[in-house]
Amino acid sequence: MCEKKKNLILAFESSCDETSVAIIEDGHKILANVTATQINSHRRFGGVVPEVASRHHIEQITDCIATALAQADVTYEQLDAVAVTYGPGLVGSLLVGLTAAKAVAFAYDLPLIPVNHMAGHIYATRFVSEIKFPALALLVSGGHTELVYLPAPNEFKIIGETRDDAAGEAYDKVGRVMGLAYPAGKEIDQLAKQGQDTFNFPRAMEKEDNYDFSFSGLKSAFINTLHHANQIGEELSKVDLAASFQQSVIDVLTLKTIKALNNFECQQLILAGGVAANSGLRARIEEELKAFPTVELIKAPLKLCGDNAAMIGAAGYVAYQAGEVGDLSLNANPSLEFDWID
Ligand code: KG4
Ligand code: ZN
């Protein structure tokens, strides 16, 4: 006889350019995690075009739901709740996932759990380990770069964030001037492994007494270096450019993270978001954490670093336990943010 499945959450993620539907059991077991990516469609524009993204979400979402239910061998009637990303993200994209989630919640009389996309990225690590509090999260994605303090389950307090570009955005912008396909993070990471930090690009805000970041100066320095070389007909080493850029990003991310670990008591450091897939960043943080033997490092699994609905289901489970339930008036909030620490 097959075991009864418990606490089944149907989760939706559609904040940017991935349409994803997952079914999560007990908050940490993935029964299905189906993602339709639109990257090939946006590549020709060198970035995500919001109107194109919404249209693709509409085209994909019902198929993703059907595939997820089939893969998990679950019917709508067996579900316990519906979780959905309601921000931050592109409003037209968010609304597609939100509307689908509301439709299922209404039709099957299920609780609707609103999930912050960034909480989702943090809870992607729930699939490798339980989260022990207090914890610190370094969240690095295409849209956000922030250090978040987690005093208790479902509580998120920003202690620092980027003042301009997100780390992933900087990767994608310098990738574009290097002639790489969007999104360029993974390819720059590969190139960086073969090169050396010969350009010594700036490390922004290193000496400032805060946990904030800035990547626009680095991006400009990189672009100016490349343009100047082009003007004088000089060919620069692609691998050294990539290694130099990446080293600068890793240095500042690591420096501020270590500073936070020195000032906030934490049991764990969580590394999450699309840029957390970066091999150089993962290795460097691991190395630096040796100086903090009481802090456990939890890295989001590589296949769950990018946007996906499984992470939304994991975060939704915790939000639901904390009593966070929305109703059918729930709206998308494109600029949703965690609160700052007091
Ligand atoms: O979290 P995510 O999937 O989407 C957002 O919520 O933004 O992050 C996507 C970002 C892109 O900017 C992409 O270039 C970057 O993650 N990325 C990487 C790597 N893999 C993906 N950046 C650096 N190194 C990587 N290996
Ligand atoms: Zn994301």
Image (spheres, rainbow, N blue to C red):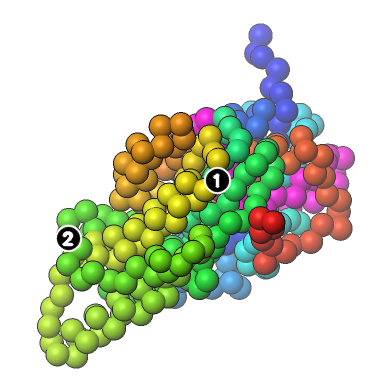
Residue named by callout 2 = 196
Residue 78: x percent and y percent?
76, 29
Residues shaded magenta? 100-129
Cβ of mark 2 under 8 A from ligand 1: no
Name above or below for residue 307 compared with residue 23: below
Residue 25: x percent and y percent?
65, 29
Determine if residue 73 is in view.
Answer: yes
Mark 2 is on which residue type? Gln
Q: Residues within 10 Å of mark 1 (few under 14, many from 20)?
A: few
Could you say whether the residue bearing mark 1 is in a helix, strand or loop?
loop
- The residue mark sitting in front, 1 or 2, is 1
Q: Residues within 10 Å of mark 2 (few under 14, many from 20)?
A: some
**Predominant SS along the magenta part:** helix
Residue named by callout 1 = 264
Residue 103: x percent and y percent?
80, 50
Say which residue appears at 32% left-offset and 72% top-offset.
Answer: 202
Residue 201: x percent and y percent?
28, 71
Say which residue appears at 35% left-offset and 73% top-offset.
Answer: 218
